[in-house]
Structure formats: C-alpha cells, structure tokens
Amino acid sequence: RPLSQPECVDGVTWESRTCADPVDRLCTPCSAECVASSTYESAVCSVHSDLICLPFTHQIRLLMRMEISLASFILAKQLDFTNAVKASTPGALEVTILSITPVKRRLLATSIDIDTQILFGEEVTALEGSSTLSDPGALDAAVSAASLPTTEVTTTPFVEIFCSLTPQCRVRNKKKSRMSYKLAGPPWTAKTCGSCLFKTNKETLVLEREGDCAHNCVGALDLSYPCMDYLGVAAGVFDNLPLVTSLSMSGNDVMGFPIGIFDGLSKEGAVVDLTCTEITCVPPAPVNEPVNYEESLWPFTRVTFVLPEGMDPTDKCKHVTNCTRGDERGCDFWINREGLLSRGGDCFYKCLEVDLRDKGVRMLPHMPITVFGGMRLIRIIHFDTDLQLIPTRQFAIDDIMGRQLTLHRWPNASWTFLGKAWFTRPLPDRWSPNQEFNQ
C-alpha cells in the first residue's frame, strides 16, 4: 500500500516509526524545549530523532571586574558579555549573570563586579574551561571583538558539581531499614563549595568533606535531597566555615548529629534547614561568648533551625552517651522530651558496646528509623528494665544478618540475635562483650 503519512519535518516532527509491513510511517511532534539553567540541548529534533535534553552537571562561578559604570552596562552589553565569556570558555554551554555590584573608587563607581555562572555538561569540559580561564588574558580577544571595556577575572575558577533539582522529601519504605536505601547515582552524591568537596561515603552512607574552604565557601551551602543523598553527618564536616550563613540538609534521612557539628558556621548567625529529616528533637545551637555585660544578659544563639513540620521548637535534644568503650568520638546518642532515642554522626566502625541504663531512654523508634542500623561492630546494648523491646520492629534483619547482637536487660529477659533469628535468654546483671565472645 502507498504511504498515507507525509514526510516528517525537521524541527516540527520526527519519524518515530518507519514504514514497514504491516504498519505505516508515524510522525511524532518534537518534544518541548529544554529547561533553561537546568538542562541543555544535546541533540536537536530532526526527521530521524527527537530533541534530547541532558542535565548540566558542573559549573564555574567567577567574579569578573569590568571598567564600566553600572548605568552604562545595559542589557545589550550584558548579552555581549555573556556571549564573549561563552566564546572564550571551551565547553561552556550556558553563561548567566547572577549579580552586578558597583565598585566604588573614592566618590565615583567606575567599575562593576559581575558574578558569573558558567554551566557545563561534563566534568572534562568544565576542567578544560577552568584551565583556560586561569590565563589572565583569556577574555581579551572576545571582549575586544564585542567592543566591551577591559574585563579581568578576579577570583580563582573552581569547578563545582551543579544540581538544579528542587529540594523534596524522600519517600520512605517503612518495611525496610533506611540503611537499605539505594542512594542516587553520580553526580548527585557530591557537591563542591569553594575548594571543598562534600560527598557521601558509599559504605557508611554518611556525609564527609575534603579540603579547606574557610575563605571561599560563602553564603548558602545547599546539601538538600535529591541533589545530595546521605543518612548521617560525620563529625567536623562543617568545621571552619565562618562565611556560611545558610545550610540546607532538607529531605535527607538524618536523625541526629555529633556534638558541636554547627559550631564552625558563621558567628554572625546562620540558618539551618532540617525540614523533611528524621530528627525528633532540636539539636544544640552554638552561642556566642559574651564580650561585655550587655551581651551576657542576652546571649546570642548563632544558629536558627527550620524544623520538620509539627515538631515542638522547645523540645531540645538531651545528650545521652557516646560509645562506652574506647576514646571514640563522633558517634553520639540523644533523647527528646519523651525519651525517644536518636543517633548522630558516623558510627559505622565504632561502638562495640553501648550502655543506655539510667539515661532516661524510654523508647526506640521503629523501622525504617533504626537507631543502631549500620553499626558493624556493635555486640551488646544495655537497656533499662522498663524499656519496651520489640526487636523485629526496632532492628532490621538486613543490618545484623550473620552477626551476633545482645540486647541486655536485667532482671527481665534479654534478647540475642544469632545468625538469622532472635532468641530470648536470661542474663545476669553484669554482662560484657568479652563474656559474649566466650559463649
């Protein structure tokens, strides 16, 4: 039979099905345009394929100084500027002016600082662009061709991982431990701020940091889900970040923090977003040390928390304990007003034994919030007699499969997980890991 469908048109329709016995050709309308500042067009819509939009993965943030007044830097010149930067930077896919600040010299502002964002689709091209922009004369030819005033890069070009996804709450599976979650794939498990790299440890699922960025990690530090994906925060991750005034961990399954985790943020005040996390009480906030009598009357709390919906802002976390044995720091246990236990820090290879007796612990959360999930070395936990234990709901089998774990209560019956199942057993008042190993 002859074709009944006309030929597809470049840029309008594409041939999603060719003519073959027994079907006719099918022309499908091209997909909508790519989202600006989020995705780029890696393939145009033609007769043989649809439009393909891929996400930007890396960026370079630069401060550039131009010898021109703010009033003279009109929209046409701004467009010429972005085109010149794009032409001078190998692999650059999109250039955006984020802000323009006049630079005052004596009484007149004859220069402006241009905060510029350059987006890339691959790390390799971003590194090549960074290397090019490190050359002092990298912009001269393109700027001159566009008839723009002298422009120079005034900051070091750092390559940063870029994510434009909107923060959201994670969908929890209540039948499984949170340690069984599959984290998002790269590059969404790492993010840069200045010369620091924040990344998720693939084994412990805890947020870690590499590098020192006290001088160039400035303003907002967005570590929210799904652009970042982690279940805890290691001690020292936010140390010495005096220029960070806003921090977001929204959406990540963090249930608590190690002691002093926020002490390194801006001393002028910082906002920490903890919405859609698993915290059950308000973490301790650092307070500025008073320097005079007036400040001693009104101590300044340096961190303001944005809490999960429905949480009582007066329910402050009370520190319970850390690991019982050894000088191990960075794994801390907390309770809220009702005695519900939570944990913070990196506890993966810490804590052979935890003693929670006479600490006010009255409840353990149920799955998927397993307080002791992912603690590979733990062998024994001591509880008060009146704490209600339902091991099958408060401990995930996947977390302890193939190991031995004892939940010690006296004089009530204790529980031991051995291999694949839980067993009750009577134990004396005193019981230690050494005795457990000798059984």
Image (cartoon, grey):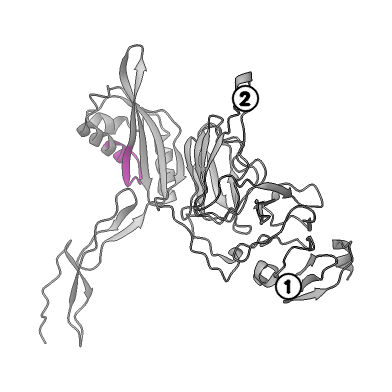
Q: Quadrant of the C terminus?
A: bottom right
Q: Is residue 176 left or right of residue 171?
A: right
Pointer 1 residue: 402
Was residue 86 drawn as part of the magenta stretch in this picture? yes
Residue picked out by circle 2: 297
Visible residue check, residue 292: no
Q: Which residues are magenta?
A: 84-97
Q: Position of residue 265 (x, y in %)?
A: 57, 36
Going by the image, does 95 lie left or right of 320? Answer: left
Taking the image as shown, residue 105 lies to the left or right of residue 293, namely left
Q: Is residue 102 in view from this perspective?
A: yes
Work out which quarter of the rendered image holds the N terminus and state it. bottom left
- The residue lying at 73 percent from left, 72 percent from top is 402
Query: Neighbour class for label 1 at 10 Å: few (<14), some, many (≥20)?
Result: few
Crowd around label 2: few <14 · some 14–19 · many ≥20 (10 Å): few
102 and 285: which one is in front?
A: 285
Q: Nearer the viewer, mark 1 or mark 2?
A: 2
Kind of residue sitting beneath label 1: Gly
Q: CA distance from mark 1 to mark 2?
A: 56 Å
Residue at left offset 57%, top offset 33%? 302
The percent coordinates of residue 28 (x first, y second) are 20, 70
